[in-house]
Image (spheres, rainbow, N blue to C red):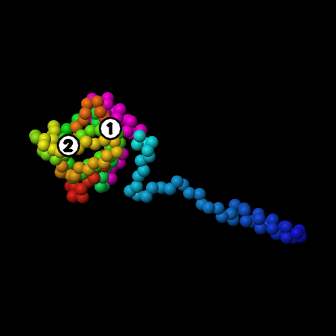
Amino acid sequence: MKKSHRTLLSLVAVAAFSPATVSLPAQTASPQPSPGVALFSSAGVQAMVAEVKRQAETNGQGGASKTLATYSDCSLAIVARTATSGAEIHRYASDNFVVLDGDATLVTGGSIPGERDTGHGEIKGAKVVGGQKHYLKKGDIFHVSAGTPHQTVMTPGHDFVFLMIKALRPEQP
C-alpha cells in the first residue's frame, strides 16, 4: 500500500473514531415505569408479609396491615390476622382477597346486629349473623362486593395473611 493511501486511511480512522464524530448508541437509564404502573418485587412483598405477620402476632389486636399503594380506583395492602375480626360492610368498595399464607373462614351475607356507621361508607359491628361460610387457604382468591356484610373468623393458633385489593366504586362520594 502506498504511503499516501496509508496516511489517508489513518486520517479516516482517526476522524471516524474521534469523540467529535463517533456515533455510539445513546446510554439510557433504567426504563421508567409508565404513569399508573407499579411493580412490587417478590422480595419486597415477602419482607412486608413477615413484618405484618410479626405485628399481628405481637400487637395484641389480632391483626395488622401495611398499605402498598393507593390509587384513584383501588388500594393494595398486605394484611395479617391472628384473631377473628369484627364484621364490616363497605358501601363504596369491593374487597378482593389473595391469600398469601395460612387459612381462615370468611363469613359473608347475613346481617350485622347493632351495626354502626363509622363514616366514609364503613359500617362495623361485632359479628355477621346468618351468613355463608367460605374456607380460604393459601393460593385462594375471594371477592366480596360492596354492600356485602363480611367477617374473618380465625381458627385459634392459625395465621391468615393476604393481599387486599380494595376496588372503589365510581360513585363513591
Q: Is residue 10 left or right of residue 88?
A: right
Badge 1: residue crowd in 10 Å (few <14, some 14–19, many ≥20): some
Residue in the image at 16% along x and 37% along y: 126
Q: Earlier in the sequence, mark 2 or mark 1?
A: 1
Residue in the image at 45% along x and 42% along y: 43
Q: Position of residue 112 (x, y in %)?
A: 13, 42
**Magenta span of residues:** 47-71
Q: Which residue is at the front of the view, 157 or 61?
A: 157
Q: Which residue is at the front of the view, 59 or 21?
A: 59
Q: Does the magenta-highlighted stretch encompass residue 65?
A: yes
Badge 2: residue crowd in 10 Å (few <14, some 14–19, many ≥20): some
In the rendered view, tell whether residue 36 sits above or below residue 42. Answer: below
Residue in the image at 16% along x and 39% along y: 127
Quadrant of residue 45 in the image? top left
Quadrant of residue 6 in the image? bottom right
Residue lying furthest left in this view? Answer: 114
Q: Does the magenta-highlighted stretch encompass residue 9?
A: no
Q: Which residue is mark 1?
A: 102
Q: Position of residue 84 (x, y in %)?
A: 23, 35
Q: Is residue 25 left or right of residue 77?
A: right
User: What is the three-letter code of the residue carrying label 1?
Assistant: Gly
Is residue 54 visible in the rendered structure shown here? yes
Is residue 78 visible in the rendered structure shown here? no
* Circle 2 SS class: strand
Q: Position of residue 18 (x, y in %)?
A: 72, 62
Q: CA distance from mark 2 to mark 1?
A: 17 Å
Residue in the image at 81% along x and 65% along y: 10
User: What is the three-letter code of the residue carrying label 2?
Assistant: Lys
Q: Which residue is mark 2?
A: 133
